[in-house]
Amino acid sequence: MAAGSNAPVIIKRKKIIQGGGHHGGAWKVAYADFVTAMMAFFMLMWLLNATTEKQRKGLADYFNPTIPVNRISGGGDGAFGGTSIFAETTMAENGAAPNPLETSGADQEAFEELEQILRGRGGESMVTDLMARHITTRLTDEGLIVELFDIEGAPLFVPGTADPEPVMQDLAAMLTRVFSLVRNDMAVNGHVQAAPEVLRVNPTWDLSTERAQVARSLLEGEGVVSDRMRRVTGHADRKPVAPNPMAVRNNRLEVILLRSDTG
């Protein structure tokens, strides 16, 4: 350009576009989503390994909006979900007779749930370690049998009498709380160890009956409605559970939750 020229000066500005721009942090969002998904996956694997089939069903039902949540459980149609456990009472109020098959199924599920509680596996346990060592349970055609038994050095009653030890009173209070979850009738069987043959009068009949009556009285004193008691029986030493008929393990009570269809 010649000196002194009046030609305009043109300045060219170059626009630089940096890579990434507005989407530069998108990988962080994707990574966070991936970490969250992995945490959910590992939590799912842990739950599958740490829970029972019934607990898994309860968790699934809890997140199912089609199943109502009630005051007994987190939802579901198991023994303590929906209305199955009180089905008999509900139908009685409506004037309809309960279906025996449905009632039997409800009993079975309820008894299984109660077994878990009595074994200390039902959430916050009502059973202490000192009480648990005196308890065993089994399901039969008659119902749920909760067996309370003597162990060496820790009897339920003062030996040779029907006077309850403190642990027996604690067991009665605990059973009352557990059995309040259902409305089934009950029965109490008393069993004692065999007496030496040299005794002229066999005391086992009276003692087993007295202990069964004391157990009934303790349960009712803790809140069990007397109308729920179907029978109280003493079986003496006739059905030992230990090979030695004179073993203390044969001193026991059977507190039975009867099935709804039991005559």
Image (cartoon, rainbow, N blue to C red):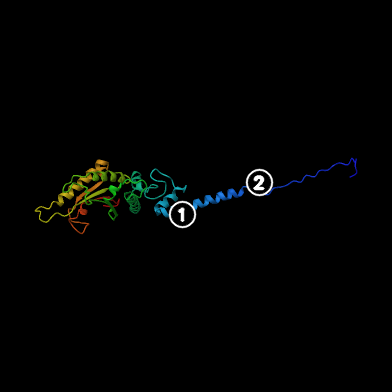
Q: Is residue 98 shown left or right of residue 203?
A: right
* Of the pair 128 and 135, the residue shown nearer to us: 128
Q: Secondary structure at mark 2?
A: helix
Residue 145 visible in the shown view: no
| Rendered image: mark on residue 45 | 1
Residue 93's x, y, as percent? 34, 43
- Going 51% across and 52% down the picture, which residue do you hit? 38
* Of the pair 21 and 84, the residue shown nearer to us: 21
Residue furthest front in the image: 3
- Going 43% across and 54% down the picture, which residue do you hit? 48
Pointer 1 local density, CA inside 10 Å: few below 14, some 14–19, many at least 20: few
Residue type at mark 1?
Met
Residue furthest bottom in the image: 243
* Of the pair 33 and 9, the residue shown nearer to us: 9
Residue 11's x, y, as percent? 81, 43
Q: Is residue 104 shown left or right of residue 239?
A: right
- Going 42% across and 52% down the picture, which residue do you hit? 56
Image quarter of the N terminus: top right
Residue 145's x, y, as percent? 27, 52
Q: Is residue 48 shown left or right of residue 260?
A: right
Residue type at mark 2?
His
Residue 74's x, y, as percent? 41, 46
Q: Secondary structure at mark 1?
A: helix
In 3D space, how far apart are the residues under numbered discs 2 and 1 (Cα atoms)?
38 Å
* Of the pair 69 and 137, the residue shown nearer to us: 137
Q: How many marks?
A: 2
Residue 170 visible in the shown view: yes
Q: Is residue 217 above or below residue 102?
A: above
Residue designated by label 2: 22
Answer with mark 2 or mark 1, whichever residue precedes in sequence. Answer: 2
